[in-house]
Image (cartoon, helix red, strand yellow):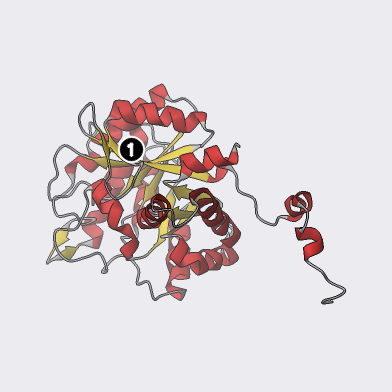
């Protein structure tokens, strides 16, 4: 049935009817807010390429986390900037590491906020890669032990969920095993199951101070040209014990997000990464786009493609806009 019998504008002409038949809904409950915790005190340093996002010492992380919780955002995702870095990323799995101390402060001061931690080595190594270097590349299997230790230390400090982002083969299984062996079988894992070697990460590397000192990460992050491989990566992580699977970045990979939604029933997350955020902020500051409209359209696109969870630096603004 087509025109003139079918007239789509009959419904579109009414705001009430548009709301009634809307196929995709966006809620504050969908959001996770990333935060960057830095060693020291009195630190609140805006990231030059990410307006409105800061490296912050623990007391300021706590203060912003309270704001996040008051806005109804259910969870934060923590990244750490340690005092010192070394070849094996010792601070990543230290009981007194920056993330471990931040977790304790948040669990003490912001009751009800879920704390998710990024599990990777790149923020903590002096070479900026995601594991132990052997023969000029990251050695997969020796890195697994350190990632497992890092995840366990986060959970022991009080993390509600861990999120391995390193893209080492087998890391979900190694983390699941060490958590279960130590009595944390109820702690979920949100795996960066499908993480591409993307140019959209540039601003994040400033924020996390994690730029590789040599080479790049193409030997362990996925080739942007590959689609079918995403299903293999996700299936492997699910088999190893992932509770939530993630696609990163977001906007350039909406087709991948939909593929995973069609194939798997697990909760699905998407990371609206730093480069995506910075481009929107830069265009909005120049008056080229209407920021609220573009951001909400982007968030809706993630939901429409199949995401249950959206990790985004826009989270606080989105929560405020949705509450209007």
Task: Name the quadrant containing residue 279.
Answer: bottom left
Q: Secondary structure at mark 1?
A: helix
Tell me what residue is drawn at x 76 percent, y 55 percent: 21
Please provide percent x and percent y for residue 189.
44, 48
Q: Quadrant of the C terminus?
A: top right
Q: Nearer the viewer, residue 229 or 282?
A: 282
Please provide percent x and percent y for residue 136.
13, 66
Q: Nearer the viewer, residue 43 or 286?
A: 286
Number of marks in picture: 1
190 sits to left or right of 210 = right
Vertical order, 111 against 54 (above or below):
above
Q: Can see residue 186?
A: no
Task: Name the quadrant containing residue 226.
Answer: bottom left
Q: Which residue is mark 1?
A: 154
Q: Quadrant of the N terminus?
A: bottom right
Please provide percent x and percent y for residue 268.
52, 55
Please provide percent x and percent y for residue 214.
14, 63
19 sits to left or right of 64 = right
């Amino acid at each position: 049935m087509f025109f003139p019998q079918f007239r789509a504008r009959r419904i579109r002409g009414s705001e009430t009817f548009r709301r009634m038949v809307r196929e995709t809904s966006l809620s504050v409950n969908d959001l996770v807010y990333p935060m960057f915790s830095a060693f020291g005190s009195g630190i609140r340093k805006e990231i030059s390429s990410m307006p409105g996002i800061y490296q912050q010492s623990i007391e300021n992380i706590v203060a912003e986390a309270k704001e996040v919780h008051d806005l109804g955002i259910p969870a934060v995702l923590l990244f750490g900037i340690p005092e010192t870095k070394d070849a094996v990323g010792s601070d990543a799995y230290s009981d007194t590491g920056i993330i471990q101390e931040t977790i304790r402060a948040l669990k003490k001061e912001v009751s009800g906020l879920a704390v998710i931690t990024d599990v990777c080595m790149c923020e903590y190594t002096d070479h900026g890669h995601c594991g132990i270097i052997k023969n000029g590349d990251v050695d997969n299997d020796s890195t697994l032990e350190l990632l497992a230790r890092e995840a366990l230390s986060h959970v022991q400090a009080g993390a509600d969920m861990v999120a391995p982002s390193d893209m080492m083969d087998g890391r979900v299984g190694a983390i699941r095993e060490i958590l279960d062996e130590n009595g944390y079988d109820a702690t979920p894992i949100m795996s960066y199951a499908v993480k591409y070697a993307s140019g959209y990460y540039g601003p994040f590397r400033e924020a996390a101070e994690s730029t590789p000192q040599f080479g790049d990460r193409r030997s362990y992050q996925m080739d942007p040209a590959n689609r079918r491989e995403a299903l293999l990566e996700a299936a492997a992580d699910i088999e190893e014990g992932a509770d939530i699977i993630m696609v990163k970045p977001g906007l350039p990979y909406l087709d991948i997000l939909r593929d995973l939604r069609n194939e798997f029933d697990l909760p699905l997350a998407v990371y609206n990464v730093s480069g995506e955020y910075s481009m929107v902020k830069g265009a909005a500051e120049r008056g080229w786009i209407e920021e609220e409209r573009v951001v909400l359209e982007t968030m809706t696109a993630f939901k429409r493609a199949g995401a249950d969870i959206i990790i985004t630096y826009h989270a606080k603004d989105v929560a405020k806009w949705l509450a209007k």
